[in-house]
Amino acid sequence: MLREQVADAMDIRVALRRRRRKYIKQHADFSVDPCDDFFAHVCPASTKGRFFVELAALKAKIVGEFRHSDQRRDAADFEQKLETLRRIIKSRSFKNLCQVSEKVMSNFSRQFVTIYPGDQEGLDTFNNMSCEDKLKMVTDLEDPAVLYEATRRELSLALNAHIANQQAHVLDHKVRIFYNKLKNAVRSAIKRTPWAKNNRAVSKYLHALNKIIFTTFADARNTSTTAFQIHSSITEKCLKQLGEEVDEERRNIICDVIASGAAKRALHRPIDKIYAQDWDEILADRISVFNSKDDRVYMGNDIMLLMNTDYLSDLYGSVGFMLTHEIMHTFVFDDLDIASNKSLVPFWTKDYKCVEEQNLKTCETFPTATCDARRTFEEDAADMAAYRIVWDLYRKAYQRKTRVENYEALDKKQLFFYGAAVVFCEENGLKNKVNSVMSQMDEFAEAFTCKPTDKMVVNKARHCELYGSKASATSEKNGG
């Protein structure tokens, strides 16, 4: 198994390296001057969404190879199981199964009945019903197989996420170390921020930073492992209870319905470090990285694959930016945050309007139908704050690193900016996001030797720096 995991890791590394280099060198539109429109240069129409599609496909390949299964065959087999379940429930002999085992069939019918937690009356009513009446409740449903299908699909998602994280355990360890480095960079930026120091708010912001917990699916693997073990043990017990009196086809379906229901309930038990409201998105495991309630930052298995690189431009420009962006959601405040009077809002910089000004300027320079500076304020502010912090960290890192052979043709400064843009080629609506941040960075213009008259330079509104030594000295608290 260890040899297979090492081989898998090597395959991932080669695939990621090749894809990122090919993306820049083969898919970037070099007929478009990066100083004229960086998003159009990096993200020509033919590439929209391709990066993340390929990333998700790579994760699916890793999972599929581990499971040694053909996904199309799995789907076909499952459809057959659903039809078998429907046929069993509709059969005249269905209610006769109570004579074999009332306990098993009562448990079977329970999987199709919704009884909410705390509804003791509903539970007592169900328990007092005869086995035959319980089965009649199932047959009266329009299509009970749909409930079983939803449960099985959820378990399948959990298994896929579990396998992906298990196979990428080295990357999981690596990203946790990297996250702490990014968190320390944010800590340093807060300490150097004039408006935070002048208002004696540094300790308050650092306290909020310290409360943020980083999580991945590794934090849920004990729960998923328990769920799979429960499924296995209940299936084995159920099959013995039904015995040879029930044919194998019916026996397998009935027991799988019961075991799947128990496994699903186990999956939904409270998990330390993970909020219940986030569980569905975590299970889906589709290009997921988010900040929840200002004190959790979660990264899914797809994005984690980007950690498998030796190139600092990839590491900081993409993963570093995304993670720091999520951290900064805790420290930038839109109208809704201000209206709800979040605890850090009174100490927030008074000079935050520069974010909207840059957004509006970019909308004028690069007209787009999805421009709404107030609606996207928090995203835009988190972008601007995070990108400066990560750039500073990257600059210090690459200056210490020796250049490796066969490195990308582009220089290290340029590659950092490509790193962020590539992952945002998903849709044209992100053009504003990319070009706003790049125009704000004087380092971008320097890296690509842009002229003062170039569009990306002209697009810069007034300098907008929310955190760090060059941020404004005024805050909402002291009013300037």
Image (spheres, grey):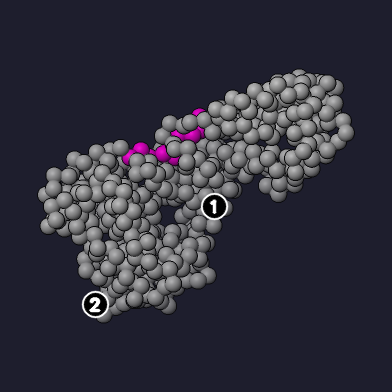
Q: CA distance from mark 2 to mark 1?
A: 40 Å
Q: Amino acid at mark 1?
A: Ala
Q: Amino acid at mark 2?
A: Pro
Magenta stretch, residue numbers: 212-222
Q: 137 above or below 434?
A: above
Query: Is residue 357 something that shows in the picture?
Result: yes
**As displayed, is residue 353 above or below residue 218?**
below
- Evaluate whether residue 410 shows in this view: no
Q: Any mark on residue 188, and which?
A: none
What residue is at 24 percent from the left and 49 percent from the top?
345
Q: Residue 212, position in %: x, y?
A: 33, 40
The image shows residue 226, relative to residue 38, as above or below, that is: above
Please tell me in which quadrant of the rendered image residue 152 appears.
top right
Counting every numbered tag in the picture gives: 2
- Res. 56 mark: 1
Nearer-N-terminus badge (2/1):
1
The question of residue 216 being in magenta is answered with yes
Label 1 crowding class (10 Å Cα cut-off): few <14, some 14-19, many 20+?
A: some
* Residue 363 magenta: no
Residue depicted at x 52% and y 53%: 55
Write the residue at 68% across / 40% down: 147
